[in-house]
Amino acid sequence: MNSRRKGVWGVIAVVIGVLLVSSGCQKLKARDELNKGVAAYRAVRYQEAVERFKLATELDPSLVNARLYLATAYASQYVPGSQSDENLQVAEQAISEFQKVLDQDASNLSAVSGIASLYFQMKRMDDAKEFYRKQIALDPNSPEAYYSVGVIDWTLTYQPRMLLKNRLNLKPEDPIRDAKERQALAERNLPLIDEGMEMLNRAMQIRQDYDDAMAYLNLLYREKADLVEAPAEREELLKTADSWMDKSMEIKKARAQAAATSSTGG
């Protein structure tokens, strides 16, 4: 009886050993495919890279980097602005793979920022904002995430304001004199403007020379100027907008001069 049990356990041990060896071989093959995929990706052979990364994830589903590279390879093939079914499918594939990374590692910053960026490029602004907020939660010191939320808020306020002005036959620079229309627009846009300003200011606290954030803060002040009734208050908001635009241009100019001096060795 004991010898029979020993025989059974011996067989089990052999099976386990074979499975472990097989599993180890698959993991090695997966890493090899991952490395080959990275080489193809760096050589801009995205389709080959996709196939390599796919195989790597099949061989070793726990290899998060392979899944992340697969998502990135898809994302690199997406063309912003193109509404073709094929192009949108590529974006959705990238998002799906990034989401699978998050299923394995919920705090993977690269996956979160990858989804946020794709949604932004696809103009799915509410979805983009959700993931930029997740990015901020994971990395509170990233000025780009705050900046991106600010840009989204401006985008969401600018479009309805311009639609209203077109409907009222107003020029872009004209004030909105219809109190009822202005109030309705303010109720919709002011929360977004306030949030956008807060986000851009936080971005500039982290990066003090963030000229792009200054430029968008200028734009949000212009949005706010169209929502006030008093001409004096509107003028003051426009002056503040101008001051932020001036600061942005000064920094851009200084940066360009520094780059020119560096390139000439001066």
Image (cartoon, grey):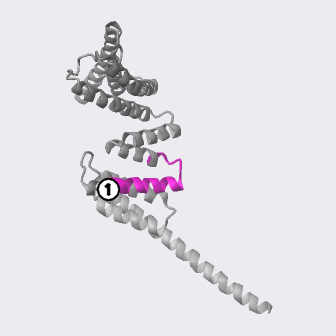
* In-front residue for pair 210/197: 197
Q: Position of residue 74 (x, y in %)?
A: 34, 56
Q: Residue furthest top?
A: 232
Q: Badge 1: few (under 14), some or many (20 or more) residues near its Cα, within 10 Å?
A: some
Q: Going 36% across and 54% down the picture, which residue do you hit?
A: 92
- First to last magenta residue range: 90-110
Please determine whether, in this image, residue 3 is positioned above or below residue 145. below
Which image quarter: residue 223?
top left
Q: Going 66% across and 81% down the picture, which residue do you hit?
A: 13
Q: Residue furthest front?
A: 180
Q: Main secondary structure of the magenta part?
A: helix
Q: Position of residue 146 (x, y in %)?
A: 43, 32
104 left or right of 96 in image:
right
Where's the N terminus, which quadrant? bottom right
Residue that mark 1 sits on: 90
Where's the C terminus, which quadrant? top left
Q: Going 39% across and 65% down the picture, which residue do you hit?
A: 54
Which three-letter amino acid code belongs to the residue tagged 1? Val
Q: Residue 144: within the magenta?
A: no
